[in-house]
Amino acid sequence: MIQVKNLTKSYGKLKVLEDIHFEIEKGGIYAILGPNGSGKTTFLKILLGMVIPGSGEIHYNGEDILKSHEYRKHIGYLPQIARFPDNLTVKEIIHMIADVREIDSLPEPLIALFGLDSFLDKKLGTLSGGTRQKVNIVLTFMFDSPVIVLDEPTAGLDPVSLIKLKSLINEEKEKGKIILITSHIMSLVEELADEVFFLLEGSIYFQGTIDALRRKTAASNLEHAIAKILEP
Ligand SMILES: Nc1ncnc2c1ncn2[C@@H]1O[C@H](COP(=O)(O)OP(=O)(O)OP(=O)(O)O)[C@@H](O)[C@H]1O
């Protein structure tokens, strides 16, 4: 489904990704992990066509995505920091994004799930951080995309909304979708992820299940496994 070969990316002299190989063959939840600045967002943005790699190949269902932009229609994206004009209302932004992707109805069940009905006429600039994130989640999940990319999706969410987000992610997985997620919250990754990719110093240091990573590092849980990898 997704194949990445020999991927590199530098920003000026800073080498962020070096010779990344990556393969996802079936639906599931895949966590991209790594310390701050290890290139997780850069990697996801390359997959999304938002950042051009230095070299390498990326195939989605056999198609070279660096040569075609069509595949972007298949991807839902929740950015780490979503920037929308503050003077738009929640309803306006939802309509705007729906128009771009050519769907005609508002995603009522998602709006209700995150308790956003009473915020529909409020301007984005007046919302709290957590409420803005709920709007971003609705904007991401309102399309039936086979690939969903979530960059730090839990930022600012209260526990009730977090539970709702986790079930939403699991429901999408049950439909056979690929969900790529980055998070620094290891308990969340442990709960959700089928496989992890751990980026370190430009390469994938580890790819496999959380159990395999725990065994490799002889650690009791994922947080300790990561700490062991990173300790000097
Ligand atoms: N547009 C850019 N121009 C220059 N350098 C950049 C740019 N985007 C990212 N970088 C640098 O590339 C490196 C990787 O950044 P990236 O955001 O991909 O890391 P990350 O693993 O997602 O980090 P975090 O866990 O902090 O979100 C960092 O050193 C960052 O400063």
Image (cartoon, helix red, strand yellow):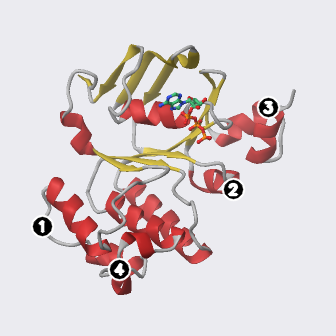
**Which label is found at residue 187?**
2
**Which label is found at residue 157?**
none
Q: Of the residues shown, which amino acid type is indicated by label 2?
A: Ser
Mark nearer the N terminus (2 vs 4): 4
Q: Circles 2 and 1: CB distance less than 8 Å?
A: no
Mark nearer the N terminus (4 vs 3): 4
Mark 1–mark 3 Cα distance, whole angstroms, equals 48 Å
Q: Of the residues shown, which amino acid type is indicated by label 4?
A: Lys
Q: Which residue is mark 3?
A: 230
Residue at the outermost right position: 232
Is residue 101 among the parts visible in the rendering?
no
Rendered image quadrant of residue 86? bottom left
Residue at the outermost bottom position: 118
Which part of the image, by quadrant, shows the C terminus? top right
Q: Residues within 10 Å of mark 4 (few under 14, many from 20)?
A: some
Q: Quadrant of ligand 1?
A: top right
Residue 215: x and y, percent?
77, 35
Q: Which residue is mark 1?
A: 104
Mark 4–mark 3 Cα distance, whole angstroms, equals 44 Å
